[in-house]
């Protein structure tokens, strides 16, 4: 989660400069030997006025894509990257990409309809017993951009809020066991 918060810092800066990444995924995050966190592969990035959406070609990694990245008119913006950050959180929690399919075509169809795979209940019970973090991921991955966190900062704040009371959650889970 701390690495994801650092990724959010990088993306908030990029968005302030009008840069939309469009291909955020775990494979595009690297940690260095001194604790630095790097966001890689900006090859699909597009420029927009800060906070605005822009029309772009369809593209991204199928199993992580937001619906607007595959469905016309292909208008992407900061909330598209928020979706991808939520998809990364979903992957960390569930071990699966949100639109995992047997083929790229299956993943693209799933992404276009925003059909998210069902997380393994046993894994979720051990990693997120209250479901709070999964809720953060799912809000970030809402079908309509207007229903998501509106900025990377809002998404980041939700994660920080969870971290602020994580110890209490773990204590309660142990007591329940």
Image: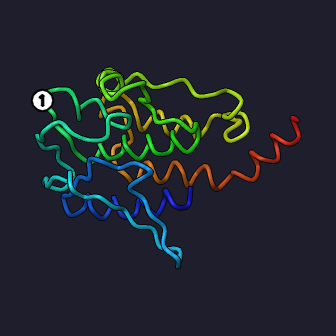
Q: Quadrant of residue 121?
A: top right
Q: Position of residue 75 (x, y in %)?
A: 16, 37
Q: Secondary structure at mark 1?
A: loop
Q: Position of residue 92 (x, y in %)?
A: 55, 45
Asked whether, in this view, residue 102 is left or right of residue 62, the answer is right
Residue occupying the point 51% across, 39% down: 90
- In this rendering, is residue 32 above or below 111? below
Q: In terms of depth relative to the viewer, which is nearer, 152 or 109?
A: 109
Residue occupying the point 44% across, 48% down: 155
Quarter holding the C terminus? top right
Q: Position of residue 141 (x, y in %)?
A: 40, 34
- In this rendering, is residue 160 above or below 144? below
Q: Quadrant of residue 124?
A: top right
Q: In terms of depth relative to the viewer, which is nearer, 111 or 163?
A: 111
Q: Position of residue 99 (x, y in %)?
A: 41, 29
- In this rendering, is residue 3 above or below 137? below
Residue occupying the point 40% across, 48% down: 25
Asked whether, in this view, residue 139 is left or right of residue 150, the answer is right
- In this rendering, is residue 47 above or below 99? below
Residue under label 1: 73
Q: In terms of depth relative to the viewer, which is nearer, 133 or 36?
A: 36
Crowd band around label 1 with a 10 angstrom C-alpha radius: few (<14), some (14–19), many (20+) = few
Quarter holding the N terminus? bottom right
Q: Quadrant of residue 129?
A: top right
């Amino acid at each position: 989660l701390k690495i994801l918060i650092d990724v959010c810092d990088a993306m908030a800066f990029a968005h302030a400069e009008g840069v939309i990444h469009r291909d955020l995924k775990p494979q595009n995050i690297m940690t260095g030997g001194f604790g630095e966190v790097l966001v890689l592969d900006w090859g699909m990035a597009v420029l927009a006025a800060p906070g605005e959406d822009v029309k772009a070609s369809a593209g991204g990694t199928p199993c992580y894509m937001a619906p607007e990245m595959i469905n016309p008119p292909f208008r992407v913006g900061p909330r598209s990257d928020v979706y991808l950050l939520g998809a990364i959180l979903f992957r960390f929690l569930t071990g699966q990409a949100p639109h995992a399919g047997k083929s790229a075509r299956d993943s693209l169809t799933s992404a276009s309809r925003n059909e998210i795979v069902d997380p393994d209940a046993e894994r979720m019970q051990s990693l997120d017993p209250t479901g709070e973090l999964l809720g953060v991921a799912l809000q970030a991955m809402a079908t309509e951009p207007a229903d998501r966190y509106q900025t990377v900062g809002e998404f980041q704040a939700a994660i920080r809020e969870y971290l602020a009371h994580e110890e209490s959650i773990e204590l309660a889970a142990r007591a329940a066991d």
